[in-house]
Image (cartoon, helix red, strand yellow):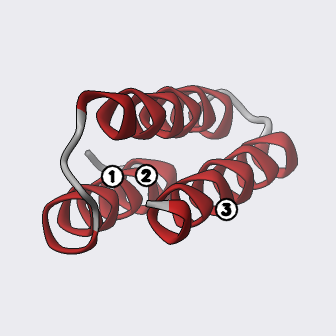
Amino acid sequence: MNEPFDILTVFCFLAMVIAFFVWSDREPRTLLRFALSAVAFAGANQLGNNGWPLPALLLIAAGAAYAFLTVRAG
């Protein structure tokens, strides 16, 4: 974990886990929706570490927005 995208995506993932336990209803459907955001963060990490910073940042923003909407809806 020495790349900036490693740190950023792990931080986003930890924030999403905290949001799941604190603000969600903890149902399996909610967990699956958060898993989609986690996949987006993992993909963004790979893109960012391989020289594609703009698509990586867009994917991080999309994953964070989807996680936010998931918490807000539940």
Q: What residue sits 49% from the left and 26% below the top?
A: 39
User: In this figure, which residue is indicated by the disc labeled 3?
Assistant: 65
Q: CA distance from mark 3 to mark 2?
A: 14 Å
Q: What residue sits 67% from the left and 62% below the top?
A: 65
Which label sits on residue 13?
1
- Total tally of numbered discs in the picture: 3
Q: Which of the marked residues, 3 or 2, is nearer the chain's N terminus?
A: 2
Q: Which of the marked residues, 1 or 3, is nearer the chain's N terminus?
A: 1
In the displayed structure image, the side of residue 27 where residue 62 appears, left or right:
right
**Amino acid at the residue labelled 2:** Thr
Q: Are marks 1 and 2 in contact (CB under 8 Å)?
A: yes
Q: Nearer the viewer, residue 3 or 63?
A: 63
Does residue 50 sit above or below 22 in this rendering? above
Does residue 53 sit above or below 51 in this rendering? below
Q: CA distance from mark 1 to mark 3?
A: 13 Å
Q: Nearer the viewer, residue 10 or 68?
A: 68
Q: Secondary structure at mark 1?
A: helix
**Amino acid at the residue labelled 3:** Ala
